[in-house]
Image (tube, helix red, strand yellow):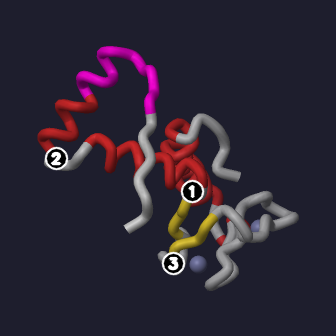
Amino acid sequence: MQPRSKLTITIDKDVLMDAKKAAKEKRVALSQVVENFLQFFADPQLYCFKCGEKLGSEGAELCAKCGWLVCPHCGACRCELDEETAVAVFHMRRVYEDLLTGRVK
Ligand SMILES: [Zn+2]
Ligand SMILES: [Zn+2]
């Protein structure tokens, strides 16, 4: 196990109360939730919409034509999708981007 560090943060009281409640219901430690999120925040992991393999946003190439990450496993990007599917994928990604308070890439 990695050495543990203490983190002191100041956040909205209600947010913390709700988070503690949710963590209790899910039976996870709040520290674990924060740690997972920070890990994701520092190095967001996505799943390829086509082959389902995990792809880190670090190191993945962007397609010059569509501007999306190109899957290093199967080479898929937006260019392979029809308009309707591309829009659906785009909106799903917004969940990440809201969470990360910024674009995934
Ligand atoms: Zn893929
Ligand atoms: Zn493309």
Pointer 3 local density, CA inside 10 Å: few below 14, some 14–19, many at least 20:
some
Q: In this picture, which residue range is highlighted in magenta?
A: 8-18
| Residue 26 - label | 2
Q: Does label 3 point to a residue whose CB lies under 8 Å from ligand 1? A: yes
Residue type, mark 1 in image: Pro
Left/right placement of residue 97 relative to residue 7 reads right
| Residue 44 - label | 1
| Nearest to N terminus: mark 3 or mark 2 | 2
> Quarter of the image containing the N terminus?
bottom left
Q: Position of residue 77 (x, y in %)?
A: 69, 69
Tell which residue pokes out farthest to the top in this image.
13
Inspect the magenta stretch and tell me whether residue 17 lies in it. Answer: yes
Gap between marks 1 and 3 measured at Cα:
14 Å
Q: Quadrant of residue 85?
A: bottom right
One can see residue 84 in this view: no
- Name the residue beneath numbered marker 3: 53
Specify the quarter for ligand 1. bottom right
